[in-house]
Image (cartoon, grey):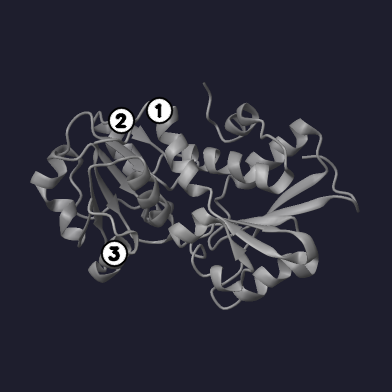
Amino acid sequence: MGAVEGTTRVVGIFGDPVHHSLSPRMHNAAFVALGLDYVYVPLRPTARTIGEAVGAIRALGLVGVNVTVPFKQEVIEHLDSLSDEARAVGAVNTIVAGEGGCLAGANTDVEGFAGALRARGVRLRGKRALLIGAGGAARAVVQSLVAGGAADVVIANRTLARARSLAADFDAGTLRARGLDALEDADLLADRNVVINSTSVGLKGAALPGYSIEATAMDCVHFDLAYGEKPTAFVAAAERAGRPAIDGRYMLLYQGIAAFKLFTGRKAPADVMARAIGIVG
């Protein structure tokens, strides 16, 4: 990271927790590579202070922020406008301050998820997916699955009503809601081509209770939206079982490439950003 001066423009990330985030490492490497006088910092508001934190973007003259767990839906009411993608998804992961301090919300997670799959040679059309979780990140995944032509998507969540609400919001005939009993349904698991974990369980190093990877087909792709310094329990279990696995760094990279353009107006140095978070080749 270059020297921080009085002219340096500030970008941040809102999350709780946020200490694990690789976004500062990724974006600061990109700023240095392009010689931009920017700095990217982690910021940890709380559920009680998130509204004030969004207002501080304008008050302090920040360029903008990324938004992660658990604030992707909570920030919406504090914004002045939403992109079409963010409105369709009902979640925001990028906020940019525009003319007169107008705060615009965008969602680059949809492209992040799709880009990660493309990079690993996975095509969604006609695929049968199991999505675990129904929070803000899950909404972007659903949008991407529907747009990509997935044939059948089961949303499994601890609170069944929330899974049903998410499925209803997208009004697509390919979406079904289940409780977490779906994780123990051998027939369902055997029929899936892709299993996505959108919960924060991986951040705590825990495994998904009751989930049997052995019940899935050998070519079933396992994608954990979470990431850490080492593979999450979900990814590690998939790798041990010989299933294709993708961790959240890939989604982080591709959503970050899109967010970088929104923050700076410049094309992101994708290779630099990938190397900064340990993705090589």
- Horizontal side of residue 168 vs 52, given as left or right: left
Q: Nearer the viewer, residue 189 or 214?
A: 189
Looking at the rendered image, the quarter that the N terminus falls into is: top right
Q: Nearer the viewer, residue 231 or 74?
A: 74
- Horizontal side of residue 104 vs 35, given as left or right: left
The residue lying at 56 percent from left, 56 percent from top is: 83
What's the amino acid at mark 1? Arg
**Please, what secondary structure does the residue beneath circle 1 have?**
loop
Residues at circles 1 and 2 in contact by the CB criterion of under 8 Å: yes
Q: In this picture, is 79 found above or below 176?
A: below
What's the amino acid at mark 3? Ala
The residue lying at 77 percent from left, 35 percent from top is: 32
State how far apart marks 2 and 3 are (Cα).
30 Å
State how far apart marks 1 and 3 are (Cα).
30 Å
Q: How far from the left and from the top, in percent, is residue 173?
A: 22, 54
Of labels 1 and 3, the one closer to you: 3
Does label 2 or label 3 sit earlier along the sequence?
A: 3
Classify 10 Å Cα crowding around label 2: few (below 14), some (14-19), many (20 and above): some
The residue lying at 70 percent from left, 53 percent from top is: 41
Q: How far from the left and from the top, in percent, is residue 17?
A: 53, 60
Residues at circles 2 and 3 in contact by the CB criterion of under 8 Å: no
| Residue at mark 1 | 120
The residue lying at 57 percent from left, 72 percent from top is: 46
Q: How far from the left and from the top, in percent, is residue 131?
A: 29, 50
Residue with the most extreme bottom position: 48
| Residue at mark 3 | 168
State how far apart marks 1 and 2 are (Cα).
10 Å
